Amino acid sequence: MTHPSDSKPEWWDSVPEADRTEYLRIWEAAAADPVPVDVDRDWARVQARISRSSSVRMGWYAAAAVLFLAAFAGLYRTQLATRMVEAPLGAVLTLELPDGTTADLNAGARLSYSPFGFGWWQRDVRLTGEAYFEVESDSTRPFTVTTHNAHVHVTGTRFNIRAWPDDPTAETTLFLEEGQVDFSSIARPDTVVRLAPGFVSRVDTTRQVPTEPVAWDTRITAWRHGGLLVRERSLTLLLAELERRYPGQVTLADPALATLRVSVYLERDATVEAVLRALRTANGELEWLRAEDGRYRIQGELRVRELPRVALN
């Protein structure tokens, strides 16, 4: 390249004397041999940088995905997963549901529900056993109880449900204390029976629809205070109830006694011996004894003498 001082270009004279040394340095640097360019090598470097950048981004995406899944798992555990509450044998358990509804669970009963949206767009529970419900009123979101063979739909009321699938009759018994309920079977959900307070209806293995409601003894809920009411039911059913209250304490000496129909009522705080005394009083020659192992055995030849029928409300 021609030195500017040699060819004297037109603009050279216009450069101040003090600045010409700097101009010459710049000119000489520009005249030096250019840096060689290797296109393939430089493109490979660019791709490597892009790859590293993409790897970093993918790492962030993966970390974000893991955090999301962890958060979702936490939400599932706390809100979406079904919750189950079980009353211990020998005790009554009271719980409050998210919508303010309360439920008393009899010994051994299980209640399950999903807390996700409970009280907002659904109020559905599933029951195995016996429970007494006081349902918060909400006409826009019915409260639904499902048992092994029946559905109960309410908007705000008080009622008792007994649904032990392993009982001899495997029936669901619904007693309404206050308000109004719709009762149907799972097999025939289109056939609905509406109960009035003080009435009871049943769905069992021999029927596809609920029985016609009949007036019933309001003391059916005596179990909430430790009491017991059994009206003209088989001794087998009573023994199943005693097994849940007093596990392993009562046995039947003669299996032939199992079909005997008995009636027993105790207002509250029924101990095992109090129940057996009431059972003996109600059924003539029925006896019981306490064996050396501490267990109670029911025995005897029975001449059935039922208790007087209680007044129906």
Image: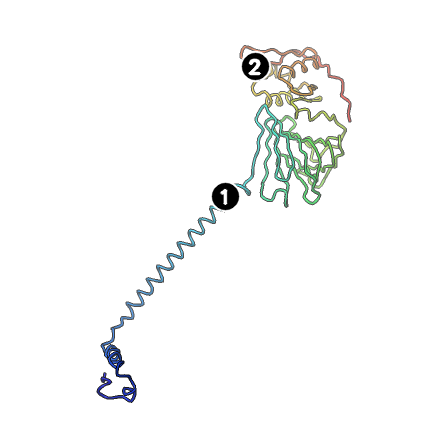
From the viewer's side, name the closer residue of 10 and 76. 10
1 and 2 marks in contact (CB < 8 Å): no
For label 2, the crowd category at 10 Å Cα-Cα, with few meaning under 14, some 14 to 19 and many 20 or more, is few
Type of the residue with mark 1: Gly
Q: Position of residue 46 (x, y in %)?
A: 33, 65
SS of the residue at dot 1?
helix
Q: Position of residue 170 (x, y in %)?
A: 64, 29
Q: Which residue is mark 1?
A: 74
Q: Residue 297 lies in what quarter of the image?
A: top right
Q: Residue 43 lies in what quarter of the image?
A: bottom left
Alpha-carbon span between mark 1 and mark 2: 47 Å
Q: Earlier in the sequence, mark 1 or mark 2?
A: 1
Q: Which residue is mark 2?
A: 295
| Residue 64 visible in the displayed image | yes
For the N terminus, the image quarter is: bottom left
In this view, 255 is above or below 134 = above
SS of the residue at dot 2?
loop
In this view, 63 is above or below 225 = below
